[in-house]
Amino acid sequence: MADKLARPHIKIIKGKRDEYELNLKEQLGRGGFASVYKGKRLSDGEAVAIKQITKRFDYGNSEVEHMESLSRDHNNHYTVKILDHYSDNKRELFLILPFYKHGSLRDYIKKNGRLNTKIASGILLQLVSSLIYLHQKRGIMHRDLTSANVLIKDISGDSIDVLLSDFGLAKKVGNNIYAKQTTCGTAGFMPPTVKDGKYKIGDEVYSLGGILYNMLTARDPDPGREKEQIKSVSDGLARDLLTELWQSDPDKLPTLQDLEKSPFLNQYRSAIKRSSSLRHSLTLNIDCKHRILNDDGKCRKCGVFPKSRKNSHDSAYGSKPPSRNTLGTNTKDAASTRNGDRSRRPSKTPSVRSQKTDNERSEKEWPIPLFHYFRKSDKQQIDEYRLTSPKGRFTISEPNILFFEALFRDKKFVEYIFELRLKGGKQEIIVYIPMRKNQELPKLHDDIIREKKYIEIITRPSELGDKYAAYYSYILKAIGVFYSRNAKINFAYVDGNGKYTAKLM
């Protein structure tokens, strides 16, 4: 009670998976029925964004349904994922979302001014890919596609990675014209057909014109002044594209596939860094012959992100254990094992010596390297960033996050879930247990177990102890397998350059 009086601006949200602290003093944005605040997850202090929705009719509930459905799809690299949600009564709903420090595209433009054509082209290409996913694979129309609802995930050099957000008005809409649809959206970005209440899913490309205009001029589009606004854009290819996108006749609007081939998007296509959504959708198939790579995986010479080459020996980790002879025993030991001397078989319980070895290795290999070299790409199969072994399942979800769903020794059910995070040169491991009793190990393509209970957080190798040291050694072995799929050698100070990275062929 005293804490509530001392901090009246703090609100505790009890989600389904964790508890969160909402800070009413740190408002990130505000709309008609919702406000977004900065908060943190109490289990690990991780910053989150908390969307507080005032329920009106079905608003809020449908957003949760859309976002949970989209978040479950491992092929979705285009929209903001929902982490958790909670409804404390019939009037308020709280959505827990990732916190992105750069905010929305509109806020970034207001702060930094208009974008150059290369950056704008890269962002628009990502949005086209996002709509191809939403429209053609999910049948969902966003219905409020604006630069305010595009979040910036990451900025690297002259490349900006974006994600679509705010699915409060999203709806399953077919590609046939539907009469008496709800009129919704934002003026300037809203297709004319939506204003009339008669629209189809393909009409949403009109909104991309408003976003492109906003990026190139730092001004919001003004409905009814499209011709005048097109003339104010300096780039000729951008003007041509805006003329196509701002068609008043919906039958003359370009398709998403037409937009992918537009001269404006293709003038920088080979130079645009493949962002998190582009590298899963572009059909561009350029390989690098030099393989002299920077830390970001791009070739120093040609600027291309090379296609990954899978190592043919990956499957060894998940196969049967090697014979004792390959593990370093002498021929006599190996022979006695083959002849049935079962007294020499290793115990299932780790010995004191093996625990000591695990602890020593943990000290030497903490923190582990970033997972930079095996980020997901458009040509990789899912098993290139996921791995199932007799010890459990390993999943690289982000370039700095790895999950290990560890099995009991009987190898039937999941005992622990380890979430390894790298941040600012430091490493932490969050330990969970499954909420469901006798939780089976998910299949390779399934999502990470979400229903889990926080146990503790490990921030230094000495905290692993005998309890977790063996599990950490399994993580290190899995990292070795991932590295073998994308092996690298670093050479320092070659030809006066600070660092070269070459891939093993």
Image (cartoon, grey):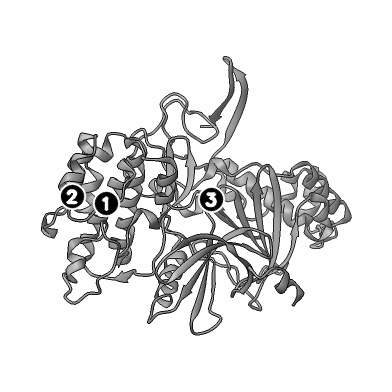
Secondary structure beneath dot 2 equals helix
The relative height of residue 420 versus residue 181 in the rendered view (above or below) is above
Decide: few, some or many residues near mark 3? Use Cα within 10 Å; few <14, some 14-19, many ≥20.
Answer: some
Please, what secondary structure does the residue beneath circle 1 have? loop
Label 1 and label 3: CA atoms lie apart by 25 Å
Q: CA distance from mark 3 to mark 2?
A: 33 Å
- Label 1: few (<14), some (14–19) or many (≥20) C-alpha neighbours in 10 Å: some
Type of the residue with mark 3: Lys
Give the residue pinned by disc 2: 226
* Residue farthest right in this picture: 352
Of tags 1 and 3, the one toward the viewer is: 1
Marks 1 and 2 close (CB-CB < 8 Å): yes
Total numbered circles = 3
Residue bearing mark 1: 221
Residue found at x 56% / y 42%: 372
Q: Position of residue 188 (x, y in %)?
A: 25, 56
User: Real-space Cα distance between discs 1 and 2?
Assistant: 8 Å
Q: Is residue 378 visible?
A: no
**Left or right side of 465 for 439:** left
Is residue 213 something that shows in the picture?
A: yes
Q: Are marks 1 and 3 in contact (CB under 8 Å)?
A: no
Q: Nearer the viewer, residue 118 or 328?
A: 118
Mark 1 vs 3, N-terminal side: 3
Question: Which amino acid type corresponds to the residue marked 2 in the rendered image?
Answer: Glu
Q: Give residue 44's quadrant in the image.
A: bottom right
For disc 3, the marked residue is 101
Look at the numbered disc 3 and give the secondary structure of its residue.
loop
Residue at 53% across / 79% down in the picture?
A: 87
